[in-house]
Amino acid sequence: MLFNSYPFLFLVLVTFVLYYTPQLKKAQLYILILSSFIFYSWHAPLLLLLLIVSGSINALSSYLVYYAENDKKRKLAASLGVIFNILILIAFKYNGMLGHALSDNLSVEKEWIDWFVLLPLPIGISFYTFQGISLVVDVFRQSRGDREPWHIEIPKSFAKHYRDTLFFISFFPQLIAGPIVKAHDFMPQIGTKYLSGIKWESTFKILVLGYFLKMVVADNLQNQTFWIAFYDIQSTLTLLVMMFGYSVQIFADFAGYSLIAIGIASLFGYKLPENFDFPYLSRSFGEFWKRWHMTLGLWLKEYLYIPLGGNRKGELRNYLNLMVVMVLGGLWHGASVNYLLWGAYHGSLLVGERFFSHFIHLPQYTFVKVLQAATVFVLVTFGWLFFQLDMQGFLGLMHAITHNTSVNHNRGVLLMIFFYTLPVLVYYANYVLSSKSSSYVVYSESVMPWVYGFMLFSIIFQSGNANAFIYFQF
């Protein structure tokens, strides 16, 4: 079920009415769980069973960790919980890779390989698996006595904890593509919510901006950037502009989804973390990963990079940790060589940047900062090509860029990409100017009602074809 579909809007409306009906106040969590199950099972009802199994495993393991009698039992329950999460992810997301590896290297019956490879890929499995792991690990760290600035309270009643865990795992606004919510941020929010607690103005603005980025910018750019697959017949300029357009498209698509999720969650009284902080303004690759898909970056840092040793065990170990984290982060996006290469590419950029930062210290002039941001944007844009093309296609595109200088430009594509990337450029420019000038902030606030009116009008009359969100495949 897509956020930009009538069935979804109907589901939200019905859920909202029932959720805030005074007579059903005690059933709020059950209403959201039921709506989440309907949302997830809309196109593939059987896959709901896997979501319930995942929630059940995490509820049981976290409960056993919290109420374990000693450290040995606590470690065993936590270890089994994490292992089961990883096994589920491997079985349903990486079954193709493993199946081919087994058939090529081991004498495994072909019938078993065929059955294994044909297991479906449940949408959102990467997201809710990471959230399940965070619940088990957070409870383990807390029960071990780690001094954390948060506390998760697990009720003595397993039935209540099971309900809370199912809700945490399945909450429909962020179930399919995040933001990735950590247990210690979300679980303490669970409780009765009231209509008077909704911040209507900010919620409205978040939802309008999110739907505008997705339906007007990303969906219309999709109609132009798909031509990049036909690179042989495109001019160098057209290909470069399409690469720029795709970079803007993937930002608008995923940032749009995240904003919609945050806005819908706020309608039900829950606060989800921000996921994007103007990442294309980053002047380093380390900064980029603090601004792009922030919840994934923080999850990888907190549950993988730091446990591996982070930067506490010397430079060489730090470089290795960065590469391991980014390669695994690439594979998290998908079970293919493309995503592995994309992760290794970003890992190499981070390692190279960290290494050369010991020897090169650039002056902080404005033109240097602009040049740094432009360099990061260009290299990140080249990396996004792995999301669209295989290695042969990538090399073919690079060849076309360097050799198609005499091919006629596709003026229609160039014009449409300019038209639909312009709002994002204005969005970024407004952010920069607002941070530099207080007088501009006053002016900006005075015209914002007109801006949101324009975005709402565009959503109604200028939306592109309703495409699935890019991150649904992850």
Image (spheres, rainbow, N blue to C red):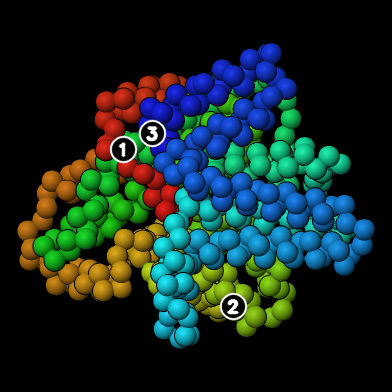
Q: Given this view, does label 1 or label 2 mark the residue nearer the observer?
A: 1
Residue at point 65%, 30% (across, down): 30
Q: Are marks 3 and 1 in contact (CB under 8 Å)?
A: yes
Residue occupying the far right of the picture: 69
Q: Give the x, y percent position of residue 428.
A: 42, 43
Q: Give the x, y percent position of residue 237.
A: 18, 59
Left or right position of 462 against 371:
left
Left or right position of 469 against 146:
left
Residue highlighted by disc 3: 4
Please rate how many residues cluster around mark 3, counting C-alpha atoms within 10 Å: few if below 14, some from 14 to 19, many from 20.
some
- Residue type at mark 1: give it: Ala
Q: Earlier in the sequence, mark 2 or mark 3?
A: 3
- Residue type at mark 3: give it: Asn
**Cα separation between marks 2 and 3:** 42 Å
Left or right position of 106 against 241:
right
Residue highlighted by disc 1: 466
Residue at point 45%, 60% (across, down): 119
